[in-house]
Amino acid sequence: MSAADLADLARAKALLESPGLAIQLANTVGAPVEYLLAKKLPVPVSGLVHRAARRAVEAGYSAAAATLGQPEGKVAASNRAHKFAVASTGALGGFFGLPGLLVELPVTTATMLRSIADIARSEGESPRDEGTRLACIEVLAMGGRRSDDDGAESGYFATRAALAQQVTAASRYLATSLGSGGAPAVVRVINAVASRFSIPVTQKALAQAAPLIGAAAGATLNLVFIHHFQNAARGHFIIRRLERKHGLPRIRAAYETT
């Protein structure tokens, strides 16, 4: 591997192994990390948040499918424009509290996925490739871990491995048909991603439930959200670019020793 590729790999690892969303959200609202990790929403509210997270991933996938048809070629990603957009939706959602979050979340998620797709294009991915769409929603699984995960299981390659079977099946389906969000193989990917994405969404709901959270804080929380996922997307698509060049086994081995 060239020095440039090794530098890219080191950058990707730094982005992918950065502090999790719970810590970032806790630092933003000034709450202890334990508050976001241990405190639970009431069961009815938790159910609403989890269902909203799944609907957000579904809506975001459809939106990504519609907006990935942009000119191909390596073009710099418009991170700032997407951050401005989610800050605006976060301000509205924060103003109306939990009901606002349930309405705002699909819009914010679709915008984040549009940003993730933009980053994918900047790393040489084809906007029209079905595999790129799946790779984009994979990024949403990199925001949190289940309560029964240990540190190793929350790592980047472990997350990809957990989704690999569903993503492979969905890729085969999409390669042989027009496909849609209703395809069983795609639904399984969406379900797997949504189960992980609902963890940081719950943390966001808890953060917004903290005292003095309003429109300004809602915008700030969304900025934390998209900053995290933009970093994860950049790392993810750098890794994918290097894997296309050098092969997955070599890149994974180098990643683990970097």
Image (tube, helix red, strand yellow):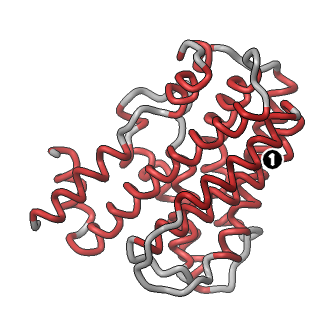
Mark 1 residue element: helix
Q: Residues within 10 Å of mark 1 (few under 14, many from 20)?
A: many
Compared across the picture, whether 243 is left or right of 175 comes to left
In this rendered view, identify the residue nearer to me: 185 or 125: 125
Compared across the picture, whether 135 is left or right of 60 comes to left
Q: Is residue 104 above or below residue 60?
A: above
Q: Residue at x 27, y 63 (%)?
A: 248
Corner quadrant of residue 69? bottom right
The type of residue carrying mark 1 is Glu
The location of residue 70, given as percent across then percent down, is: 59, 83
The location of residue 197, given as percent across then percent down, is: 62, 43
Counting every numbered tag in the picture gives 1
Q: Is residue 219 above or below residue 173?
A: above
The location of residue 139, given as percent across then percent down, is: 52, 54
Q: Is residue 44 above or below residue 135?
A: above
Looking at the figure, which quarter contains the N terminus? Answer: bottom left
Compared across the picture, whether 184 is left or right of 166 comes to right
In this rendered view, identify the residue nearer to me: 238 or 28: 28
Corner quadrant of residue 100? top right
In this rendered view, identify the residue nearer to me: 228 or 200: 228
Q: Residue at x 65, y 28 (%)?
A: 203
Q: Residue at x 36, y 46 (%)?
A: 15
Q: Which residue is mark 1?
A: 104
Q: Residue at x 38, y 40 (%)?
A: 155
Corner quadrant of residue 224? top right
The location of residue 11, given as percent across then percent down, is: 27, 51
